[in-house]
Image (cartoon, helix red, strand yellow):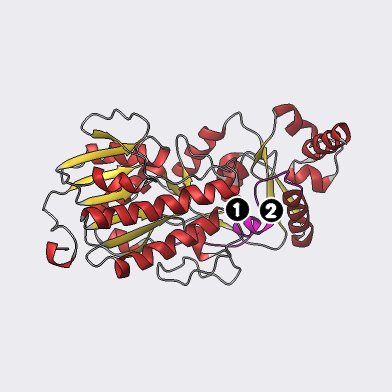
Amino acid sequence: MSSPADGGRRRSARPTVAVTGAAGVVGAAVSACLAETEGVRKAIALDDRRVDVPGVIFRAADTRDPGLALRLGDVDVLIHADIDTSPDTDAAKRTNYNVRGAQTALTAAAAAGVGRVVLFTSAVVYGAYPDNPVPLAEDAPLRAVPDGSLVGDYLEIERLAERAPKSHPGLSVTVLRPTVLTGPGMDTVFTRHFEAPRLLVVKDTEPCWQFCHVEDLASGMVHAALSDMDGPLAVASDGWLGQQEVEEISGMRRMELPEALALGAAERLHRLHLTPAPATDLQYVMHPWAVSTGKLKATGWQPEFSNAEAFQALLVEIAGHHAALARRIGKKDAATTLGAAGATVALVGTAALVRRARKKRRTTS
């Protein structure tokens, strides 16, 4: 509970809640959830693109402009949902977009007297290691490596969220960490892993898959917005799926490689700019990083989707797409890579990409 005396606006029993990035996948899900939540006095959608959701007020706003504070005068809680997770975005532009967005949201909220900010990162911040307990506790140390990928953006957002209450007395910050996000419109490094011709499995590793439907993330963020819960909160479906269960549900066949071979191929392809995913991202398909959702569930929140249901939603969304190490390829290229291309290149689905890159270099030299 914040008060005007310590820099925040006193929280009402039925707060006004605003969401940034309301035209995006996560923001749209949050807006829809807010519209159906009785505990919200007024729901506000903030974006520079028009959003029309029954029961939600739209306000045009650039969520990376400090002028955002002027749009938050009557807001009690701000949900920051405007994060770019696309594998196709230039890495430097994506980092600037994500980090600047979080920083602006936190600063604008403090300037406007907003009492609480709720934002999300990802459970990838814990890192994926063979010695990870299953599940990870929500207060487990963050051991992920900031390698220039989206993981680095999340770690920086976590740092900003941790510092904000110290810099702005009266401001509370809650961070939700979902696992693999699924559902309509979700397109990430992880969803594209399942667009490969065959599933990459690294020999002698035991991955476990835990999913989070975007509607469960949205309901978790709204639930946190209406509570006084601080600190990190994991959000996901209950339990997890083993690699064999994932293969049975998807009907996909695996291709298994030794670790050194898989990581070496991924590193070379990323260095050649043929794939957006750095080699370190393979750790997340090799080792466990499933999380406990005990804190949210202890306050009454429950996921609507099981892991199998959330995974099925992912499979529906990726139907007709083909990718290799997070880079989309054509159906014809995907099929030919499984022919005589050789086991390693066929596995990662990059034979066509390599040929195309070499041809381009020859024609431009």
Residue that carries the numbered disc 1 in the rendered image: 243
**Which residue type does callout 2 highlight?**
Val
Please name which of the two marks, 2 or 1, marks the residue nearer to the observer: 2
Asked if the residue under mark 1 is in contact with the one under mark 2, i.e. CB atoms within 8 Å, the reply is yes
Any magenta on residue 360? no
Image check: 145 left or right of 345? Answer: left
Q: Residue at x 45, y 71 (%)?
A: 140
User: Local crowd at mark 1 within 10 Å, few (<14), some, or many (≥20)?
Assistant: some
Task: Say what secondary structure mark 2 lies in.
Answer: strand
**Which residue type does callout 1 highlight?**
Gln
Q: Residue at x 85, y 39 (%)?
A: 341
Among the two numbered marks 2 and 1 on one chain, the one whose residue lies closer to the N terminus: 2
User: Residue 78, position in %: x, y?
Assistant: 27, 50
User: Residue 326, position in %: x, y?
Assistant: 64, 43
User: Local crowd at mark 2 within 10 Å, few (<14), some, or many (≥20)?
Assistant: many
Magenta residues?
Answer: 272-291
Look at the magenta stretch and give its main secondary structure: loop
